[in-house]
Image (cartoon, rainbow, N blue to C red):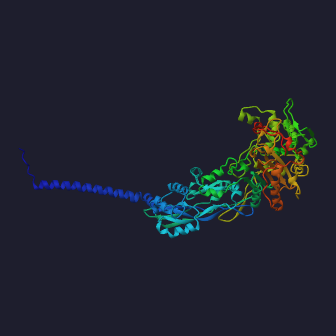
Amino acid sequence: MSRLRYITPEEAFRHYRRRLEVAGLSALLLFLLLAGRLFWLQVIQYDHYHAMAENNRIALVPAPPPRGTIYDRNGVVLAHNDTAFTLEITPHEAGNVDEVLERLATLIEITPADVKRFRRLLAESKGFESVVLRSRLTEEEVARFAVNRYRFPGVEVQARQFRQYPYADVMAHVVGYLGRISPQDKARLAEAGMAANYRGSEYIGKAGVEASYERWLHGRTGVEKVEIDSGGRAVRILSRSPPVAGHGIHLHLDAGLQQLAAEVFGDFRGALVALDPSNGGVLALVSRPGFDPNLFLDAIDQTTWAELNHPMERPLINRALRGVYPPGSTIKPFMALAGLELGLRTPADSIVDPGYFSLPGSSHRYRDWKKDGHGVVDLKRSVVVSCDTYYYRLAHQMGIENMHRFLSRFGFGQKTGIDLDGELAGLLPNPEWKRRRFNQPWWPGETVIAGIGQGYMLATPLQLAVATMAIANDGIVYQPQLLRAWQDPITGRMHYAAPRLLGRLPLKADNLKVVKQAMVEVMLPGGTAAAAGAGAPYAFAGKTGTAQVIGIKQGARYDEKRVAAHHRDHALFIAFAPADAPRIAVAVMVENGGSGSGTAAPMARKVIDYWLLGKRPALLAPTLPTPATPAGEEEEREDSVPAIEPAELQPLNGRDGHAG
């Protein structure tokens, strides 16, 4: 049995004091640690945590700038901002969003597309920012919601600016349109260091001038410093840096001319480009059919989207820049000039046209559009009556390499550099291109066909207009340009864009004179466009063209009346006027329009009459293709024309011989 030790009061007191000292020392150390931590947080780290607290208390709310207005050369508004009411929800204040949407749908029409867009925007937004549910509320809807406003905390009707395009489809391919900023747009903006300037912005230029001059039109985003509470609700605005509106953009375009140019197409598809030869300014740029750019500001329904992607109509395609077509006989003035410049022809040289051309040692006949030929044809007459045989011979003598080098100087086979996105370069073929593309040699017959603007050769209407402008200007070539001036939003000062001179072609004045005179005579009695030029009170220079869409076998004859509408020839026409002092250069391309003389040339005449004379015709739209016979062409009776069987239809390049 162990013995218990007796502890004296003095020993017990000592033990107690030691425990008390340890506890006191521990408490002191804890207080020192706490004080040190407080000193670290409140003194050393003060700036850091103060900034964090301020960031939690203050929200930077972007203030999107008003977008710049787009005008034509006369100050006519082509795109502007309009105020409309939107229904917006602030998630932190609204509570259960799904329930709110259900109750709102009993007051205001909300489509599944509205809900889908709202949820996407909601996922990208911050809780204290309002998110648009419905755009462009009617006055009745605004009034209906106002009466029930008390039932929907966090839901507001706001007045916001929306882009408006008063000319709708007439200007769609030039002015372009806005669309919602996509993830791809955000990535591009971030890469360009512009993401901050688009905070709060929902739309960005997607096409046309809206896209090309996006930086100028967008403006500079402002910022509001807003104090928010712990629930994310705005309490008050602390400061505001106002946004700066975008630049006003003034174009060379003439709204009246553009509208007329669109109307003359009627139900045809195609494109028209009109340029100012003195500076390259784009006076009109039309692609038909068009589309309404206002549709792209909100969600597009499936039916409308299907119409916009119709495989034949393709209204979203800018045919003036992206439509590539065989230039047909519109290439002949350039070929004639090449023959003169290269010393292969003189104005007095002539040939006897039997109605066809054959390569040496070949029995194949490349036929003229006129069955019995044109008889004796010199260079000028070859342009006036559009003699194919003359250019078959010339092309064979010239060779594809010389042809390629000369025509490329006029811009064929390359982009013009217009200040619009999406332009295509067309195609100016040569043996090297064919080897790369098909791994095949170039055949002499392909050179012959290229001489009348067929075969592999492709050009856009814009390229034809620029090349025509070069002839009108005696070799001076300007880059086509839409921008005429821009206005500073702060100072109001107008700045004018200088013409972009690309250079001057070293062409002999006498050769140019011969070709230009030939183009003038095209519009006179005996020329292929005599009907379109009749009665013009100004000297009118032009050239018709017809480009095949399908080919026929050797010996069969093309008859438009027996061919499906989408297989009919394209109609082309180039012109400038007045011939002695050009003020306008025009290129017209009409898909499946038949002949250039019967369809495209009359369209150009109305456009040029308007520009030079201020004359607006009462009847603008031509009838659908009823091919006219060019002056001098002998019409065959229908019973003498053999039918084209489906088996005789061949891909492009199969038929030769076209009336201008």
Q: Which of 1 and 165 is in front in this view?
A: 165
Residue 164 shows in the view = yes
Horizontal relation, residue 633 to residue 24: left or right: right
Eyeballing the image, is 360 above or below 312? above
Horizontal relation, residue 428 to residue 577: left or right: left
Residue 380, horizontal then vertical, whole percent: 90, 45
Residue appearing at x 65%, y 51% in the figure = 307
Q: How many labels does the image show?
A: 0
Q: Which of 362 and 14 is in front in this view?
A: 362
Eyeballing the image, is 522 above or below 53? above
Residue 510, horizontal then vertical, whole percent: 90, 47
Quadrant for the N terminus, please. top left
Residue 337 shows in the view = no
Q: Nearer the viewer, residue 271 or 309?
A: 309
Horizontal relation, residue 595 to residue 484: left or right: right
Check the image and name the residue furthest to the left.
Answer: 1
Residue 200, horizontal then vertical, whole percent: 55, 59
Q: Which of 112 and 158 is in front in this view?
A: 112
Residue 651 lies in quadrant? top right
Check the image and name the residue furthest to the top.
Answer: 361
Residue 317, horizontal then vertical, whole percent: 69, 49
Residue appearing at x 62%, y 53% in the figure = 303
